[in-house]
Image (cartoon, rainbow, N blue to C red):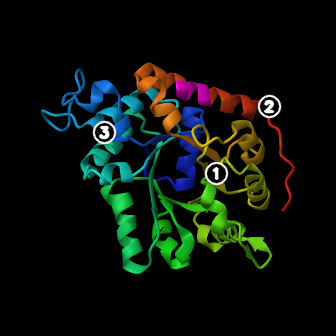
């Protein structure tokens, strides 16, 4: 992908090239790896960048990318699955492989970073320089100075936690701040001068379609990364009705477990699950409905 493009241009290009709003989450849990990879030291039939042994996380990622290249607009590796095992080298190799097999796709490092000063700058360098990610998820709880380092490069993006998909999200995100819930205040700041370069997105969970509809009405220009479809129980039709923008886009709909562990992690089943999600999204985009939205 052309790194001279702005992040907004690259996001649009990724969606147009793939014809898709699908984001495939890379969550290679060692306890759930396919049987043929869990104990294997060789990835037969393909070049092995690690020499003799093919580390299983990277082998599984390669299988997922091979199965979904051209279907996914983005890939979202969750850093915890790699760093917990000291397997950051496998993450680096997997991102490089995405660049080879799906060069137009975005890579989103799901790290949920949030700190201030030179620490935040260090986390930004980690995401963008060490791993070569296009965007990174960021926790905005510490305010503007914790977000700015991730927005400094116009070709890279920050994806702010806003209304997340987990059950505990309401503990703080729904608390009223000057008459609006906190997640709405986060979105206001994000849509304002924080997004001067157009390289900021919001995480908005599929499990809360009413809140998503409110956010779309208030911020028609922002794009949302949407977790929660599939294993977390989010409804796809409700998500599309709530979150599609005026152009039938504005969303990256993320699915991890429902895709990568389909059929026990077999290549054909992974591809079938990704195609099924893309087809369902396309059906909703072709016949858009709208939830009742109130500001």
Q: Is residue 60 left or right of residue 69?
A: left
Instruction: Please report contact status of discs 1 and 3: CB closer than 8 Å, yes or no.
Output: no
| Residue at (47% x, 21% y) in the render | 269
The part of the image, by quadrant, that contains residue 94 is: top left
Q: Is residue 137 magenta?
A: no
Q: Is residue 100 left or right of residue 134?
A: left
Magenta highlight range: 273-277
The answer to whether one can see residue 93 in this image is yes
The mark closer to the camera, 1 or 2, is 1
| Residue at (31% x, 47% y) in the render | 91
Instruction: Please report contact status of discs 1 and 2: CB closer than 8 Å, yes or no.
Output: no
**Residue on which disc 2 sits:** 287
Q: x%, y% of residue 112?
A: 47, 61
Which quarter of the image is occupied by the N terminus? top left
Which quarter of the image is occupied by the C terminus? bottom right
**Residue on which disc 3 sits:** 57
The mark nearer the N terminus, 1 or 3, is: 3
The part of the image, by quadrant, that contains residue 160 is: bottom right
Q: Is residue 38 above or below residue 180?
A: above
**Residue on which disc 1 sits:** 205
The mark closer to the camera, 3 or 2, is 3
Q: Is residue 238 above or below residue 157?
A: above
- In terms of secondary structure, where does tag 1 sit? loop
The mark nearer the N terminus, 3 or 2, is: 3
The part of the image, by quadrant, that contains residue 34 is: top left
Query: How far, Cα to Cα, is label 1 from label 2?
Result: 22 Å
Q: Residues within 10 Å of mark 3 (few under 14, many from 20)?
A: many
| Residue at (45% x, 71% y) in the render | 149
Q: Is residue 80 above or below residue 141?
A: above
| Residue at (30% x, 48% y) in the render | 92
Q: x%, y% of residue 143?
A: 56, 77
- In terms of secondary structure, where does tag 2 sit? loop
């Amino acid at each position: 992908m052309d790194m001279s493009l702005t992040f907004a241009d690259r996001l649009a290009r990724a969606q147009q090239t793939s014809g898709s709003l699908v984001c495939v989450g890379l969550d290679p849990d060692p306890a759930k790896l396919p049987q043929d990879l869990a104990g294997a030291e060789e990835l037969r039939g393909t070049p092995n960048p690690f020499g003799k042994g093919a580390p299983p996380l990277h082998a599984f990622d390669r299988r997922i990318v091979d199965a979904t290249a051209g279907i996914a607009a983005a890939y979202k590796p969750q850093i915890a699955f790699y760093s917990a095992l000291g397997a950051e080298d496998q993450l680096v190799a997997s991102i490089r492989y995405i660049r080879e097999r799906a060069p137009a796709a975005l890579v989103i490092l799901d790290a949920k970073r949030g700190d201030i000063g030179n620490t935040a700058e260090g986390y930004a360098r980690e995401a963008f320089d060490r791993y070569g990610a296009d965007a990174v998820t960021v926790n905005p709880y510490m305010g503007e100075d914790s977000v700015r380092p991730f927005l400094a490069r116009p070709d890279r993006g920050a994806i702010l936690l806003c209304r997340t998909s987990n059950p505990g999200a309401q503990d703080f995100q729904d608390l009223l701040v000057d008459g609006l819930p906190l997640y709405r205040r986060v979105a206001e700041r994000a849509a304002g001068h924080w997004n001067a370069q157009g390289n900021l997105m919001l995480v908005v969970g599929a499990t809360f379609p009413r809140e998503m509809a409110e956010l779309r009405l208030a911020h028609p220009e922002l794009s949302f990364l949407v977790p929660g479809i599939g294993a977390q129980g989010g409804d796809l039709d409700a998500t599309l009705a709530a979150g599609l923008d005026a152009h039938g886009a504005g969303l990256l709909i993320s699915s991890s477990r429902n895709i990568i562990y389909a059929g026990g992690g077999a290549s054909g089943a992974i591809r079938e699950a990704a195609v099924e999600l893309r087809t369902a999204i396309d059906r909703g985009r072709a016949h858009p409905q709208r939830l009742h939205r109130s500001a």
